[in-house]
Image (cartoon, rainbow, N blue to C red):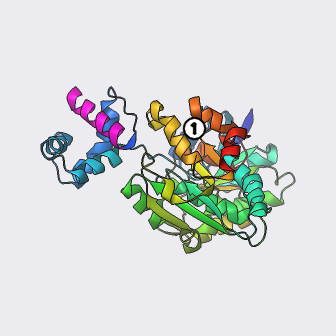
Amino acid sequence: MKTCLVVDDSRVIRKVARRVLEDIGFEIAEAADGMEALAWCRAAMPDAVLLDWNMPVMNGIEFLRQLRTEPGGDAPTVVFCTVENNVDHIRAALEAGADEYIMKPFDGEIIAAKFAEAGLL
Amino acid sequence: MTPEDMDLLAALGRARAGLKIDVDKTYVVESRLAPLARREGFDSIEALIATLRAKREERLIWAIVEALTFNDTSFFRDRDIFAHLRDTVLPDLSKARLDQPIRVWSAACSTGQEVYSLAMAAGESRDVEPGARFEFFGSDLSERCLEKAQSGLYTQFEVQRGLPIKQLVKHFNNTDDTWEISPRIRQSVRWKRINLLSDLSSLGTFDVILLRHVLDGLEPSLHGRIIESLVARLAEDGVLVLGPDDQLTGAAATLLQAGDPPGVFVRGPAAREAAA
């Protein structure tokens, strides 16, 4: 079973995302900020990361840049999931190594479609 | 709505546009007519239907028939088909059409995502001959769908169905939650209201015709006739693309032979001879 780390400071969003991703066959781990997410990744690299942008302690883009420099950090498929919807943010995410990008609000259909596009399904 | 109302609507949809309307699915018809009733200033769907019965006005009849069509679509729907068109069909045609444009027709284009996806895919094909020219056409029965298609404006929800994020930032710009396709892509498509039951012979010839996720909403007894009139518009070496689950029976099946992936058809030997 593929693993997905859900990184979001909102417990509600993590819960919604967990339900959607479990339905499409992922095993879920959760982190509330980029620092917690890095700790998870250093212990065990997930197959996928669903990543919020604005979070306390370490935000999503800082986490992603750091992740891509870690040993094995190239491997996870990273899908941003954020309210930031301007083209500059999306370009910055892609440059930092994001594979796909979801603009909130999202639903199960969008997550499944984007995970398919990122080659995860 | 009464069963008599449903019978009337189903008969109108069938006679005017070949629509297959299940008279037991009142809720489906109500959900499609409610926005029209509001726009036309009626208090209810019942009031709309009462006026339809009383006046039999052509404009209102067509507004109702258009509202009854099923318009669900998305960018790059059935991704394999678009990869096949980009990597095989369009490159082959570009070699065969050195000094002529390659004409591509989305024959029930709804709100335009299918033909815009093709325009994006054609521009990204590595194997299309340099200098190849494409002409894209989108047609639909619904004037409202065509207006939206032509505007090139999509909601945030629509651009997240099927459109890879790299294509989104390459071809679109947004103001808040509204995304606008680039003028270059938008201007590469021409639009026209076409009823597929009408005489199509004045439309010329096309190299690729798409009729995907459409037959399912049309009366099965009309499928053969519609396919035949599309095949008559297909270049000798043209390609007809149907939905992945569309099955051809009767005369239509003898006109065409299936290619790969599912849904891709070319003329059968007899039809090829007749076209030559």
Number of numbered callouts drawn:
1
Depicted B187 relative to depicted A110: above or below: below
Q: Nearer the viewer, residue B173 or A73?
A: B173
Residue B10 falls inside the magenta stretch:
yes
**Magenta span of residues:** B1-16
Determine crowd level at label 1: few under 14, some 14-19, many 20+ residues with C-alpha closer than 10 A. Answer: some
The kind of residue on which mark 1 rests is: Val
Q: Is residue B15 left or right of residue B183?
A: left
Q: Chain of mark 1?
A: A
- Relative image position of residue B106 (x, y in whole percent): 55, 54
Q: Is residue B212 left or right of residue A118?
A: left
Q: Secondary structure at mark 1?
A: helix
- Relative image position of residue A39 (x, y in whole percent): 75, 49
Quarter the N terminus of chain A occupies: top right
**Residue B246 in view:** no
Q: Residue furthest right?
A: A71
Q: Residue furthest left?
A: B54
